[in-house]
Image (tube, rainbow, N blue to C red):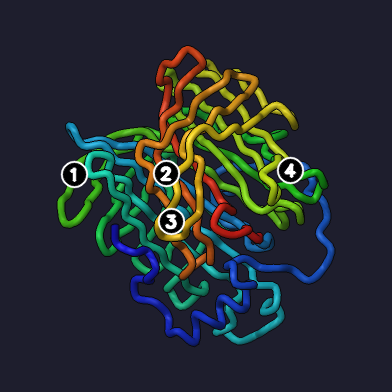
């Protein structure tokens, strides 16, 4: 595996240090005043596919599974936007008022290998941008754009490349209460959050100079907020799973340093469109098997028993080493990878992504 600790065409080391210092070493603004609870609001599309620059933190996140003949791949791409509070009053065009980050990774199941790359830049100068009108995000030569009900990603990287189209097959899934998703015991710990599961995926995927025409399924999350984590939370565990029958499962928990749940939640939408939002205390993550990273020495549960109101599932990583080192952009090391979903009868019923943060070091948003 190529070490994922270099930026393609990085900014100068001085600029990078200034950017990281400006956002508290994590890539995310820290804020200066009190944060109020987010009001309920009706999300509107395609407008809410776009950026919300008045909010401190935002990300667009696509994960999926694709195949070409006997070759199977997992892929993920994430674009982050962060408002830097300390620079908002500056008039200089060079002021880093908004920062754009991006991560991308490919899991080669047959090769038992993960590739990862990352980008960071301040918004402006035709280098980085996130349109507030619709999904149109650019970071140097990486992009994510919408054309009606089709979303396209173009991400060339050092050892891999993604050139994929994601076609909507189902309506937008509004997480939480009509798109307002609680993330902690205090009302201010919430986000606006929606998903697009069961995206029909097609295009090309390239690893180590070998190009594959692929098809598969993907999942898109878009989330924006002023504050997410309770002070006692050090990280989270999250799954987004496309079930083979067309259903969609989301489950998450935020953990404290002892591994106890600070908050939990999620949802299940059946293939027929019946929607169930999970209440606090209804989701339980229980680790079954762990893997220790030789890079970070962090110990990650790569197999879980996840209890939800929909069923009790086993979530199992397809390969253990899917740890991402993003210290050159968002400042974190975390685990994020393709996983299988197995129901209480022992049948594999879907695939999707498992994300685990805060195991190498406490996460701060």
User: Residue 137 at x, y = what percent?
Assistant: 46, 59
Of label 1 and label 2, which has the lower sequence position?
1
Q: Residue at x 34, y 64 (%)?
A: 3
Residue 177 left/right relative to 137: right
Q: Quadrant of residue 26?
A: bottom right
- Alpha-carbon distance for marks 1 and 2? 20 Å
Which residue in the structure is indicated by mark 3?
324
Whether residue 224 is visible, yes or no, is: yes
Residue designated by label 4:
262
Question: Crowding at label 3, few (<14), some or many (≥20) Cα neighbours within 10 Å?
Answer: many
Q: Which of marks 1 and 3 is nearer the N terminus?
A: 1
For discs 1 and 4, the disc positioned in front in the rendered view: 4
Res. 154 image quadrant: bottom left
Mark 1 or 3: the one toward you: 3
**Residue 331 picture location, percent across and down:** 53, 66
Compare residues 109 and 152 and report the one nearer the observer: 109
Q: Mark 2 points at which residue?
A: 337
**Residue where numbered disc 1 is placed:** 212
């Amino acid at each position: 595996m190529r070490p994922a600790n270099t930026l393609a065409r990085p900014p100068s080391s001085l600029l990078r240090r200034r950017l990281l210092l400006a956002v508290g070493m994590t890539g995310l603004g820290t804020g200066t005043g009190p944060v109020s609870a987010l009001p309920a609001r009706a999300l509107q599309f395609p407008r809410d596919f776009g950026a919300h620059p008045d909010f401190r933190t935002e990300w667009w996140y696509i994960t999926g599974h694709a195949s070409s003949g006997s070759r199977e791949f997992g892929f993920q791409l994430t674009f982050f936007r962060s408002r830097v509070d300390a620079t908002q009053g500056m008039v200089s065009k060079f002021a880093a008022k908004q920062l754009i980050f991006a991560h991308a990774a490919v899991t080669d199941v047959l090769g038992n290998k993960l590739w990862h790359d990352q980008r960071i830049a301040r918004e402006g100068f035709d280098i980085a941008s996130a349109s507030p009108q619709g999904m149109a995000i650019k970071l140097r030569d990486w992009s994510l754009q919408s054309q009606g009900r089709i979303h396209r990603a173009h991400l060339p990287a050092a050892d891999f490349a993604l050139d994929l189209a994601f076609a909507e097959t189902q309506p937008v899934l509004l997480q939480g209460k009509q798109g307002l998703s609680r993330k902690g015991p205090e009302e201010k710990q919430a986000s606006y959050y929606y998903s697009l599961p069961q995206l029909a995926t097609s295009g090309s995927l390239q690893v180590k100079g070998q190009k594959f025409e692929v098809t598969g399924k993907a999942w898109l999350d878009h989330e924006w907020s002023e504050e997410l984590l309770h002070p006692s939370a050090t990280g989270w565990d999250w799954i987004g799973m496309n079930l083979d029958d067309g259903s969609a499962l989301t489950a998450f928990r935020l953990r404290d340093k002892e591994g106890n749940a600070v908050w939990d939640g999620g949802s299940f939408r059946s293939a027929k469109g019946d929607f169930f939002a999970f209440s606090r205390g209804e989701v339980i993550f229980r680790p079954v098997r762990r893997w220790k990273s030789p890079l970070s020495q962090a110990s990650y549960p790569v197999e879980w028993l996840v209890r939800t109101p929909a069923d009790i599932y086993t979530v199992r990583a397809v390969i253990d080493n899917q740890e991402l080192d993003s210290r050159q952009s968002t400042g974190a090391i975390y685990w994020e990878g393709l996983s299988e979903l197995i129901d209480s009868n022992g049948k594999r019923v879907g695939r999707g992504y498992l994300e685990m943060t805060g195991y190498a070091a406490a996460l701060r948003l």
